[in-house]
Amino acid sequence: MRKPRPPSKRTAERTPLDAGAARERALKLLSRREHSAAELAFKLQRRGAEAGIALAAVAKVQDAGLQSDARYAEMLVRNRIEQGYGPLRIRAELAAAGIAESVARDALTAAGCDWGARCAELRRRKFRTAPKGAAEWQKQYRYLASHGYTADTIRAVLKTSPMPEEDWTEPFEG
């Protein structure tokens, strides 16, 4: 029979973080990658800091210029554009990270992206050929929509290879 394992760090009772430890944890998290203020506060709370202490630690690193929601938004927008995502998906991801709508709008505007060209490039990379039937046209439309492009942008891109006519048969009469 096996001996019971001691509890792991994740399952063991965590000691609450005080203000100094919360600030150190915030700095450690920010040294790996950018975080939004809301994301950073959530991670600090998850690691044992009370809500007030977590928010105070985030405010201190913001005052020191080490955390900025605008910088986080610019980084995320740049990365997601390179990955082929559209403005709707990027805006939703920024909202999920707790970024204000005005900051998200400014970051998307500052990117200066030609969304139509990016959508067309993504379509060429994924499908390589024009759709051969209505089902394939719809498949391409759904794929581009799932990547966060607007319906108008997708229609403009797919208009270069319009939806082919289906072989319609006369309805059965009888």
Image (cartoon, rainbow, N blue to C red):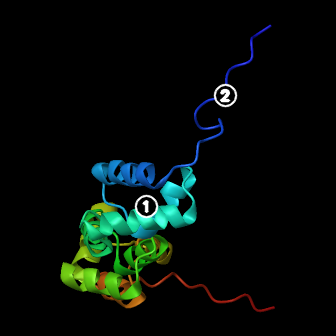
- Position of residue 88 in the picture relative to residue 3 (left or right): left
Q: Residue at x 28, y 76 (%)?
A: 70
- Rendered view: 63 above or below 1: below
Q: Nearer the viewer, residue 20 or 58?
A: 20
- Position of residue 63 in the picture relative to residue 89 (left or right): left
Residue that mark 1 sits on: 40
Question: Identity of the amino acid at label 2?
Answer: Pro
Query: What is the crowding at mark 2: few (fewer than 14 residues within 10 Å), some, or many (at least 20)?
Result: few
- Give the CA separation, mark 1 to mark 2: 26 Å
Residue that mark 2 sits on: 7
- Rendered view: 35 above or below 20: below
Q: Residue at x 48, y 72 (%)?
A: 96
Q: Position of residue 132 (x, y in %)?
A: 40, 72
Quadrant in which residue 124 is drawn = bottom left
Q: Secondary structure at mark 2?
A: loop
- Position of residue 174 in the picture relative to residue 165 (left or right): right
The quadrant of the rendering that contains the C terminus is bottom right
Q: Secondary structure at mark 1?
A: helix
Query: What is the crowding at mark 1: few (fewer than 14 residues within 10 Å), some, or many (at least 20)?
Result: many
Quadrant in which residue 141 is drawn = bottom left
Q: Residue at x 33, y 73 (%)?
A: 69
Q: Nearer the viewer, residue 124 or 106?
A: 106
Q: Is residue 127 visible?
A: no
Q: Position of residue 44 (x, y in %)?
A: 49, 55
Q: Residue at x 40, y 65 (%)?
A: 58
Q: Is residue 40 visible?
A: yes
Q: Position of residue 62 (x, y in %)?
A: 31, 69
Question: Identity of the amino acid at label 1?
Answer: Leu
